[in-house]
Amino acid sequence: MSRACEAGGWATVAEVAAERITARRLISTAVAIAALVIGAVPAHARTTPHPPAHPVAKPTAASDAADSTLVAPEVVNRIVATIDGEPVTLFELHAFADQVRQRAAGGAAGAEAQVPADDRGMLDELVLDKILHKQIQEQGVAATDQQIDSYIASIKERNKLDDAALRQALAQQGLTWEQYRAQVRSDIERAALINKEIRNKVNVSPEEIERYYKEHLTDYGTPAKAHVRLLSLLVPSDATPDQKAAIRAQAEALRKDAASGKDFAKLAKEHSQGPGKEDGGDIGEVARGQMQSEFENAVFALKNGEVSDVIETSSGYHIFKMEQRSGEAHQPLAEVKDDIKEKLYRENMEARYDRWLKEDLRAKYHVEILL
């Protein structure tokens, strides 16, 4: 359920705890995307790294417009929230929004749709981002240069990028090498924090796995199958009613012969105009869902050795014989339990993360929203 960072000594990072944090750290080139992904965490954790100590990125178009109309600096930099009394300004919010939108634009398909549409939603993300950053500092979580180097090396290898190509991609995203390393450092530290706070508190019991298996048994089923033979008499598109009736009568006669015990394979080889004629009408094994409904309903109503009634379609008349059928079966629990465990683990991790972030962690800080 987890993988170790290639840099020696770093604690394992639960996949569920990291993917959504790094989902927006996407560095794309014209032919490749260097995706910084290590796991899976809820959507609101997909914030950009906490703004570094150096000056933040330039404001959004909204703040640019404010400058162009000579809006007073105190309006642009007004306080929009506080965290334990520490102010969060409108300027910070717009800079943060720029970072989020820029990375989403260069990220995976659908990333932009996950970006909050208004300042209020973006402010919620910024507040959560700052709280996570405070928690990282409080607990002394720190990534080493070796861990960062190893992580970047794995990204280059995964996306077939050399140093020059990666730096060019970063430049296209408006990032310097130092800013990029700061983002990677933040990703590693956040993943380590969440791994520490959540992973050890999430468990999936054998009873949960078995209960899920029984409740979703149809998801692990194999469809009923039938080995059949087919005898088809085709009706020309320009056939008259009398000609069509004559073909129907022939089909009924052949069906009667087959049902009375005559060799179906011989009858098909001599009379059929459908697939498998040379093999005595043997069309092999078919499963539910592979045949048109008229055929499937007739075939799977037959027992071994039985012959169907004549089935009329737009192409002609058809008769099936059931050679051998096998009923529906299910993959045994032993074969699917690992997949079920991983699925439930991820779901439990999501739920635990939500509680930790929205209730446990946020309750530690006094947040006041002023926007």
Image (tube, rainbow, N blue to C red):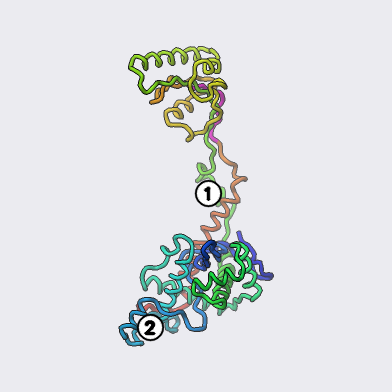
Point out the stretch of residues depicted in magenta. Answer: 319-328
Left/right placement of residue 171 relative to residue 70 reads: right
Give the Cα separation between the discs numbered 2 and 1: 49 Å
| Residue 17 visible, this angle | no
Residue 93 placement: quadrant: bottom left
Residue 125 placement: quadrant: bottom left
- Which of disc 1 and disc 2 is earlier in sequence? 2
Instruction: Point out the residue furthest to the right here.
Output: 8
| Residue 258 visible, this angle | yes
The amino acid at mark 1 is Tyr
- Tell me where residue 211 appears, x and y as whole percent: 53, 48
How many numbered marks, from 0 up? 2
Q: Is residue 86 magenta?
A: no
Badge number at residue 212: 1
Majority secondary structure in the magenta region: strand
Does the residue at mark 2 contact the one at mark 1 (Cβ under 8 Å)?
no
- Tell me where residue 239 appears, x and y as whole percent: 36, 19
Identify the residue under disc 2.
Answer: 79
Residue at (50% x, 15% y) in the render? 258
- Residue 96's place in the image compared with 27, above or below, is below
- Residue 282's place in the image compared with 90, above or below, is above
Left/right placement of residue 247 relative to residue 132 reads: left
